[in-house]
Image: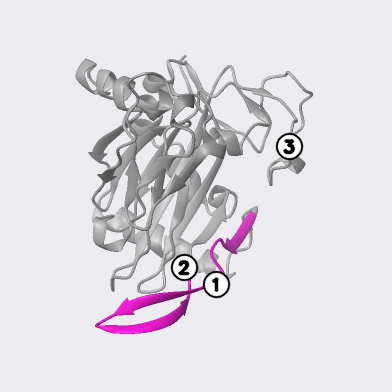
Amino acid sequence: MLNAAQLAEFEQNGFLKGDVILSASEVDHLREELDLILEGKTVKKPVLQHNMRPEEADALYKGMKMSVTEKVIQIVNTWMASDAYMQQCAHPVICQEVAQLCKTDTLRIWHDQIQYKPPITGGPTPWHQDHPLWPVIQPADLVSAWIALDDAVIENGCMWMVPGSHKWGDQQKYMASDDKFMPYHRQPGFLPEGAEVKAVPFEIKKGQVGYHHSLTWHGSPHNRSEMKRRGFAVHYMPGHTVYAPTSAHPMIPYVEVKEGEIMAGEHFPVVYNVG
């Protein structure tokens, strides 16, 4: 359970580092399951599996400039392909702490995702806010839990966050980054008075969980190291989240409720409920 200081930190910054909650053997098991999914060897399949960055890019490796095919392998709804990942989505510590952050007594899975940046060729994940990519669910009260399957550090492309940005509303179309992957706002006057766009690294250890609000600015640069960077994120909906069909999304074919109704159903399972 999160204490008052941790809850205040999340309220101020829009992100928070939790504890190491998985043992080395538990992480190894999730890695093995991930390999089976990547190789297409599971009976059940995820909703989506693709490379988010298929373009060519120049990179420096051991002093040599080379052209690489960048890769950020994304798998959506790993829980549908693996019972081990379903159990992870329902991890009692994570769910209790996310419920605290969401101020709710019920949590459902919106969806989960793997993002894997392989060594050397791992590409960036551009600066973004999550909820503007999910306008089909409202309101923007979701909290994500990001579990590291490898140490996520600056060298292998860990996430970076902008403190306080979850309080600035939907700024997605105004976000950009400079040559050093630092974020900036194309129209600063659209930000609240006193807002400062200053990114900080969000390094977390293997087996550790980190939390962020669905409006927090975040992104991650290239992985040019020889380390893998595998992470598993679960995007949790508080109990009052409703369906608002305004745009396309890979999960829409699985929706069974009508507009304005609570987003529920077998593909959006309850993983936490008080009582």
What amino acid is found at the position of numbered circle 2 in the picture? Asp
Task: In this rendered view, identify the residue nearer to me: 214 or 150.
Answer: 214
Observer-side mark, 1 or 3, equals 3
Look at mark 2 in the image and give the residue it sits on: 35
Q: Which mark is residue 162?
A: none
Q: Quadrant of the N terminus?
A: top left
Q: Which residues are magenta?
A: 48-70
Q: In whole angstroms, how far apart are the C-alphas of marks 1 and 3?
A: 31 Å
Reply above or below: 183 against 100.
below
Give percent across and percent down for residue 122. 41, 67
State how many labels appear: 3
Q: In whole angstroms, how far apart are the C-alphas of marks 1 and 2?
A: 6 Å
Q: Are marks 1 and 3 in contact (CB under 8 Å)?
A: no
SS of the residue under disc 1: loop
243 displayed left or right of 5:
right
Packing grade of label 2 (10 A; few <14, some 14-19, many >=20) is few
Residue drawn at (46%, 16%) of the image:
104
Reply above or below: 110 against 100.
below
Look at mark 1 in the image and give the residue it sits on: 39
Q: Are marks 1 and 2 in contact (CB under 8 Å)?
A: yes
Give percent across and percent down for residue 131. 55, 33
Task: In this rendered view, identify the residue nearer to me: 210 or 56.
Answer: 56
Look at mark 3 in the image and give the residue it sits on: 247
Give percent across and percent down for residue 191. 44, 25
What amino acid is found at the position of numbered circle 3 in the picture? Ser
- Looking at the image, is mark 3 or mark 2 earlier in the sequence? 2
Magenta-drawn stretch, dominant element (helix, strand or loop): strand
